[in-house]
């Protein structure tokens, strides 16, 4: 019998693939940043520096050219580490989304975390697209109704019987309240008769 539980394997697979891509991107960026620091003194770095020095805009001012080179190298390192932090945050959001997928009632919350992970993974990168697809699946796919619920929903006799049972229950409660009220009135009358000073001989 269908118990109304939906499998979220597709969302989990997409989320895990996106996390793997994020981890690969973090490793590559960290390697590139550390490689930039090692470029100084190499032939490629000297050639790059010489091209800037030979630029007509810096003719006669080698100090400014040196400042430009240092600014470019520093900016690349800062930008690289910022991208690493953003990808780490994206990975954390994706992991939180996967954790929320364990509870079928938290699927929409998982979709929100997948969207956040996608935005931080590059907005329109391959990784972000995977996260967006997982988020859409979280929002669109709903748990199916159980077979007994579907039968009861389509069964007009069950609905009529349910309404009848509810009305019978209400009527029984009304009868019980009337009975209690009548008993209380009888007790009050009996109490007044006992307290009356005029009693028959």
Image (cartoon, grey):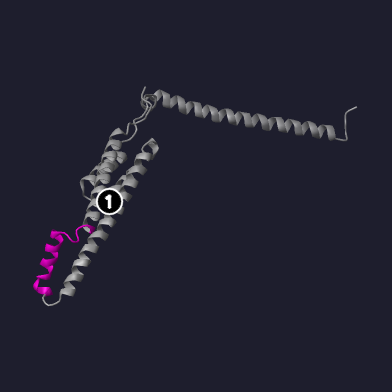
Q: What residue occupies the far right of the structure in this picture?
A: 201
Residue at 69 percent of width and 31 percent of height: 182
The part of the image, by quadrant, that contains residue 64 is bottom left
Left/right of residue 23 with respect to residue 181 in the rendered view: left
Is 183 in front, or is 72?
A: 72
Q: Residue sitting at 12 percent across and 77 percent down?
A: 60
What is the secondary structure assignment of the residue under circle 1? helix
In this picture, is 179 found above or below 25? above
Residue 190 percent location from the top left of the image = 79, 31
Residue 159 showing in the rendered view: yes
- The stretch of residues the image draws in magenta is 37-58
Q: Residue at x 15, y 76 (%)?
A: 61
**Is 46 covered by the magenta stretch?**
yes
Write down the residue under mark 1: 119
Please report the residue visible at 50 percent of the width from the left and 29 percent of the height from the top. 166
Question: What percent of the width, then of the height, locates residue 17?
Answer: 26, 39
Quarter holding the N terminus?
top left
Snapshot quadrant of residue 181: top right
Q: Is residue 66 magenta?
A: no
Decide whether the magenta segment is chiefly helix, strand or loop. helix
User: Is 171 placed above or below 20 here?
Assistant: above
Q: Residues within 10 Å of mark 1 (few under 14, many from 20)?
A: some
Residue 95 location (% of width, % of height): 34, 43
């Amino acid at each position: 019998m269908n118990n109304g539980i939906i499998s979220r394997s597709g969302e989990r697979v997409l989320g895990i693939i996106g996390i793997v891509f994020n981890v690969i991107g973090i490793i590559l960026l960290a390697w590139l940043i550390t490689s930039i620091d090692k470029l100084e003194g190499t032939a490629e770095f000297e050639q790059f520096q010489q091209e800037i020095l030979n630029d007509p805009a810096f003719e006669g001012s080698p100090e400014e050219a040196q400042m430009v080179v240092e600014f470019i190298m520093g900016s690349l390192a800062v930008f690289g580490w910022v991208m690493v932090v953003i990808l780490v945050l994206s990975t954390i959001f994706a992991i939180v989304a996967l954790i929320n997928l364990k509870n079928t009632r938290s699927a929409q919350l998982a979709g929100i975390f997948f969207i956040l992970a996608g935005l931080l993974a590059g907005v329109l990168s391959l990784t972000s697209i995977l996260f967006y697809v997982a988020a859409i699946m979280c929002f669109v796919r709903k748990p199916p109704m159980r077979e007994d619920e579907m039968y009861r929903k389509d069964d007009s006799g069950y609905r009529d019987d349910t309404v009848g049972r509810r009305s019978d229950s209400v009527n029984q409660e009304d009868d019980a309240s009337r009975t209690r009220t009548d008993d209380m009135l009888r007790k009050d009358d009996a109490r007044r008769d006992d307290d009356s000073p005029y009693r028959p001989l």
